[in-house]
Amino acid sequence: MRWRRLILPSFLALPVLALLLGLGTWQVQRLHWKTALLAELAAAQAAPPVPAGPAPAPFAHITATGRFRPGAEAFLGLEVRGSTLGGALIAVLEREGAPPLLVERGWAPFEGGAIERPEGQVTVSGYARPAERRGLLAPADDLARARFLTFDPRAIAAWLGAPEAPAYALVVVQPGPPRAEGGFGQAPAPARGPLPDPQRGFPQPRNPHLGYALTWYGLALAWIAVFALWARRRWRDA
């Protein structure tokens, strides 16, 4: 009779335990994936740049030489620096003997600012930014003001008059110290220096998954302890 009083509660408690353990295991898998990704990014940044091809690996270290097409510019994303609203400036790099290339030159304000636009031949280097998948709830692009909120290289290249450009962008990286953080986690707008303001290094995504895994596994142990104490009391009362 005592065991019968624990059968139904056990069947109700097991799915919760399985869910907590499953979430912890999922975070362990995410930890291994993120660790490998960070290692790949570090290796790509340390490797010498190679000429930008038609389809480089995501975040590969690449370089390209050409001339920026006058007037072929658009903005990607929204970022507030200090009190200035801006985004990543996308330009079209005309290359001799190769298709044009989308180049993400760096952050620039939507309005104002002395943006440098080189007229001669330039060489840029950085990493290959792959296309993003547009989410169901993603806001629409503001084509009237040349502002894109999702990185769709095909759509951006077509809008800029370069539909033959490959489906990625070269993100310019300027070696140097990390950018100082401003209020609300945003970097301040550059008071001096040229615009646009390029990236200082390759992407460095956070890797908090070990803490998440320990949290879920800890909750699973706590669930086991709580159920054991409750079952012990129910057994004793029976």
Image (tube, helix red, strand yellow):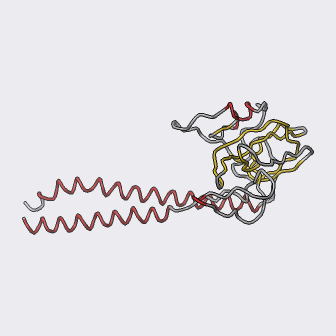
At 78% from the left and 41% from the top, the residue drawn is 91
At 8% from the left and 67% from the top, the residue drawn is 237
Tell whether 189 sits left or right of 98. left
- Out of 74 and 202, give the one closest to the viewer: 74
Q: Residue furthest right?
A: 120
The part of the image, by quadrant, that contains residue 32 is: bottom right
- Out of 193 and 146, give the one closest to the viewer: 193
- Out of 11 and 196, give the one closest to the viewer: 196
At 71% from the left and 48% from the top, the residue drawn is 57
Look at the picture and state if 197 lies above or below 70.
below
At 34% from the left and 63% from the top, the residue drawn is 219
Residue 58 percent coordinates (x, y): 69, 49
Residue 21 percent coordinates (x, y): 37, 59
Marks counted in the figure total 0
Residue 22 percent coordinates (x, y): 39, 55
User: Can you say which quadrant of the picture contains the N terminus?
Assistant: bottom left
The part of the image, by quadrant, that contains residue 39 is: bottom right
Residue 194 percent coordinates (x, y): 81, 54
- Out of 198 and 108, give the one closest to the viewer: 108
Look at the picture and state if 94 lies above or below 64.
above
Look at the picture and state if 113 lies above or below 73.
below
User: Can you say which quadrant of the picture contains the C terminus?
Assistant: bottom left
